[in-house]
Image: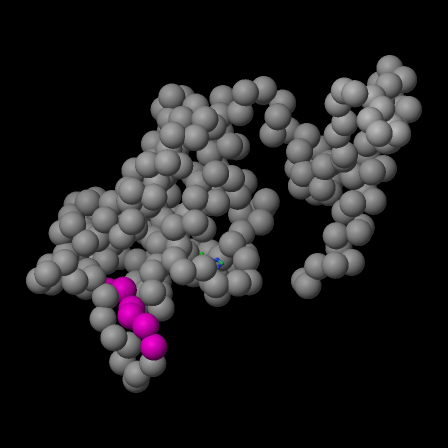
Amino acid sequence: MQIDVVTLFPEWFDWFRSQRHIANAAAQGHELRTLNPRENTPLSGGQVDDTPFGGGAGMVLRVDVMDHALRSFYGVDPVDLRRERRVIALTPGGRLLDEGLVNELAAEPAVTILCGRYEGFDERIVQHFCSDAVSIGRYVLAGGELAAMVLCDTVLRKQPGALGHADSAAEESFSDALGGDPEYPHYTRPSEYRGWKVPDVLLSGHHEEIRRWRRARSRERGAASEGSSLS
Ligand code: 6GU
């Protein structure tokens, strides 16, 4: 798939791209590109944002600047772009990113992610250029870049070949294989450390019992986290 990130801080993604599973995804033909609206802003002095109408703190990313950036990158009116590909505004008030949305986006051939900064976007950017508004949690980040990395990480690790082992993503937390529950606990050598023992069943070699034990632990964790969730 192709992921384009619109950001005033493209250099943040240099480190991200060098991480192994992202580099693996790139080697499989997946693309992670960045474009910086400041580089071809129609305003002088590299201006991209402005003070909010009605007053208040902070700066707002201008709609004309985003229009210009998307139009010159894609060669189409951004109003039409969102019919060709998912265009996602990252904003604290958006749809909460969960495993369902990740699976949805991982199946897309191409997505564009807009990172807000300062007080965020002029609302007309979200209304007219975007297909989705997404948030990674109910807290406020200084900008969308870390959220974009979270989104890219979750979506790219779903691509075949991004993880070292073919089954790594199949039976993990929130997968269908685990009925949407969190993953069961893992243990490795030593089988006893400071008196802390690995559960006997895992050392038993009884695959069916191990499977049942894991499913039960997974369900327990699911039930426990439900009790503590807000939704
Ligand atoms: Cl997507 N952006 C910002 N700025 N803050 C957030 C967020 C996004 N998701 C949670 N907090």
Q: Is residue 206 left or right of residue 59?
A: right
**Does the magenta portion include 23?**
no
Q: How is the image coloured?
A: one colour
Above or below 191: residue 114 = below
Residues 190 and 64: in front is 190
Q: In the rendering, at what x and y percent does residue 126 appear?
A: 35, 63
Q: Quadrant of the C terminus?
A: bottom right
Q: In the rendering, at what x and y percent does residue 12 appear?
A: 34, 44
**Does the magenta portion include 59?**
yes
Q: In the rendering, at what x and y percent does residue 3 appear?
A: 36, 39
Q: Is residue 210 visible?
A: no
Above or below 175: residue 134 = below
- Numbered label tally: 0
Extreme front residue here? 194
Q: Is residue 128 left or right of residue 91?
A: left
x 53%, y 25%: residue = 163
Q: Is residue 109 left or right of residue 69?
A: right
x 34%, y 77%: residue = 57
Q: Quadrant of the N terminus?
A: top left
Q: Is residue 117 left or right of residue 137?
A: left
Q: In the rendering, at what x and y percent does residue 39 appear?
A: 16, 50
Q: Tell me the magenta residue range.
A: 57-63
Residues 226 and 21: in front is 21
x 78%, y 58%: residue = 227
x 59%, y 45%: residue = 99
